[in-house]
Amino acid sequence: MIRELMHDPILLSRVSREAAAADIPIAADLLETLAAHKQTCVGMAANMIGEFVRIIAFDCEGKYMVMLNPEIIKAEDPYETEEGCLSLLGGPRKTKRFQKIKVRYQTESMQVRLKTFTGWTAQIIQHEIDHCQGILI
């Protein structure tokens, strides 16, 4: 189901709880909502649709990917950039990101995975994990 986007910075600043198997339907809604906004958005966290649970969905080189409970366990090559956010009003804001990250996460079948991401995809993931932690750019 395509869900309405949340724009309240106070609510978006809440830290999300850990995702469980019962939260899988939220991942499906998140994917549908992301696909509905594909012209203006490359990633979403569950709190952007009003669900304060650690789930993100994003464009991974042309294919959508979902992560439950993502955690960056290694980050290399910091750089400064500017990012916008569909949930926040106003233009791009400055932020620090890493060119290469290693992420531990769970799949939609709750399997634990480790994967390394670089470049644009790594930047998207960092932005969405920040959302899960209540960090707004």
Image (cartoon, grey):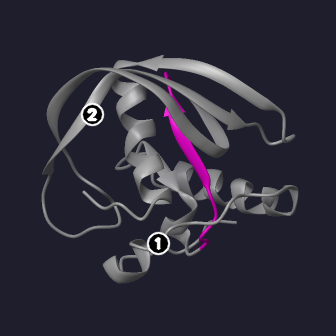
Q: Residue 31: give its label.
A: none
At horizontal 34% and vertical 50% (from top left) the residue drawn is 40
| Quadrant housing residue 30 | bottom right
Q: Which residue ends up furthest to the front in the rendered image?
A: 73
> Compared with residue 45, is residue 7 higher up or lower down, i.e. above or below?
below
Nearer the camera: disc 2 or disc 1: 2
Q: Secondary structure at mark 2?
A: strand
Amino acid residing under circle 2:
Arg
Q: Residue 97: give its label.
A: 2
Q: Position of residue 94 (x, y in %)?
A: 12, 47
Which residue is at the front of the view, 76 or 43? Answer: 76
Amino acid residing under circle 1:
Leu
Q: Position of residue 126 (x, y in %)?
A: 40, 39
> Compared with residue 52, is residue 32 higher up or lower down, i.e. above or below?
above
At horizontal 64% and vertical 64% (from top left) the residue drawn is 53
Q: Which residues are magenta?
A: 51-62
> Compared with residue 81, is residue 41 higher up or lower down, i.e. above or below?
below
Q: For mark 1, what is the residue? A: 5
Q: Position of residue 38 (x, y in %)?
A: 45, 46
> Is 133 colored magenta in this rendering?
no
Sequence-first tag of 2 and 1: 1
Decide if residue 68 is on the left or right side of residue 45.
right
At horizontal 65% and vertical 41% (from top left) the residue drawn is 67
Q: Secondary structure at mark 1?
A: loop
Decide if residue 9 is on the left or right side of residue 109.
left
Badge 1: few (under 14), some or many (20 or more) residues near its Cα, within 10 Å?
A: some
At horizontal 35% and vertical 82% (from top left) the residue drawn is 10
